[in-house]
Amino acid sequence: MPNELKPTIGLEIHVELKTASKMFCSCVNDGFEKEPNSHVCPICLGHPGTLPTVNKEAVKKVIKTGIALGCQIPEYSQFDRKNYFYPDIPKGYQISQNDFPLCKKGFLSINRKKIRIRRIHLEEDTGKLYHEKESTLIDFNRGGVPLMELVTEPDIESGIEASCFARELQTILRYLDISDADMEKGQMRIEVNISLSSQKKRLGTRVEIKNLNSFRSVERAINYEIERQKKEKVVQETRGWDESSQTTKSQRKKEEAHDYRYFPEPDIPPLSSREFIGEIKNEIKELPQARKERFKKEYGVDEKIARIFVLNKDLGNYFEETISELKEWQKAGKGDGDALKLAVNYLISDIQGLLMGKSIKTILITPENFAEFIFLISEKKISSKIAKMILLEMFKTGADPSDVIDEKKLLDFDDHKLEEIVDKVILENPEVVENYRRGKKEVVQFLIGQVMKFSQGKADPQKTRERFLEKI
Ligand SMILES: [Zn+2]
């Protein structure tokens, strides 16, 4: 198709790093939604005569991200001054990195497609402006917070691909404890650049989109912009995503672009990453994609379940601890293969339901007790109805399942009692019994149900069935 236009999309992602202190001073890096200008000092306020000191923790976090994303980590790296005059940066320049970033040439695979990463560098965040009716207020709590910037090559071709990339990156950053990367809190900020190219016109005019506050808005803004660029004459500009109208709107034309006059930061010596690399490599454990594949292979769970355990890392860890405890229990039992499936189901539906959005870390049930609970069900020692009662009690008190059973006399139900109830149900349901004898074998389910009702779920369904088959 000669007229087919192909979207070419690149992302610039800023991430606030989770460090104890700010990038170049000792202010505590915890000023979000605190009293404005309460987390500031002469250094991050840019007073004359102050000197920046590099936060090594921040440098290590950026290198760690780079290693996880398969980047080259150049031996030499340096900070530069990015000069611009705007109230959010009191020095009149931002300390950033231009020609010698900490990491370059990495990639992240999204659905088996490699999205190349051009560079990852480190800089300082700016203050936050609040535009009132007649004036503008500034909060410098955010000023000087370590900020990582990751730039991709324009390898992305759709809105969904862009949001998948961003989500995957967020998961990795959380795994490595680089950042909480919460978009709503501005800890992860995404800018999109997009153009459409055709065979005739090699590369189209590039438009930047800002003001994207969620993965969904990234996806929608790209989809909107693709359609707009197909219809309108495109000029080089910066556009902002407008959530209320679900459109992008022009913010700044190209002529207004800055010339930042970068030059090397004279107050900070060049960085050598060599001293960190070995140590950081040891710190990187399993990454999300590898974990997902391992869960699928090791536990035989499907893609969807594996994904849940990867996105909710603590739940995945709890699951793994449960399974390892369960193996101990199974040595004593029949080793029912369904136990693993039961553990998955109870964790994902019942336990998640009881937690009501809270982290599994808050749960009182230990993986050891949970494993015993699963074992009791898989060995058919308790019915699913009794299991629910036990689980609720365990959830409330953290008790051992056998203790709950003893205390509540849940299995206080012997063969003699079962016999009694079975006889009673047969007597009370002559028509059903008659139907069974005429060949409607499925009605036995109804009779078992009746026994369950009279025994308040305490009867063992398998035993009950056997009794009926003997008697009718
Ligand atoms: Zn400070």
Image (cartoon, rainbow, N blue to C red):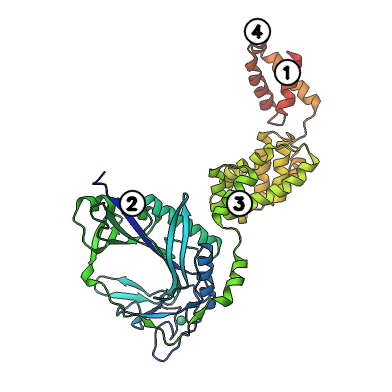
Disc 1 packing (10 Å; few <14; some 14–19; many ≥20):
some
Marking on residue 220:
2
Disc 2 packing (10 Å; few <14; some 14–19; many ≥20):
many
In which quadrant will I find the N terminus? top left
Q: CA distance from mark 3 to mark 1?
A: 42 Å
Image vertical order of residue 296 relative to residue 458, above or below? below
| Closer to us: 168 or 466 | 168
Disc 3 packing (10 Å; few <14; some 14–19; many ≥20):
many
Q: CA distance from mark 1 to mark 4?
A: 15 Å
Q: Which sits earlier in the primary sequence, circle 4 or circle 3?
A: 3
Label 4, secondary structure: give it: loop
Residue underneath mark 4: 438
Residue underneath mark 1: 468
Image vertical order of residue 196 relative to residue 186, above or below? above
Label 1, secondary structure: give it: helix
What is the quadrant of residue 40 in the picture?
bottom left
Image vertical order of residue 91 relative to residue 136, above or below? below
Mark yes or no: residue 185 visible: no
Q: Which sits earlier in the primary sequence, circle 3 or circle 1?
A: 3
| Closer to us: 95 or 110 | 110
Please provide percent x and percent y for residue 470.
Answer: 76, 16
Residue underneath mark 3: 316
Of the residues shown, which amino acid type is indicated by label 2? Arg
| Closer to us: 366 or 77 | 77
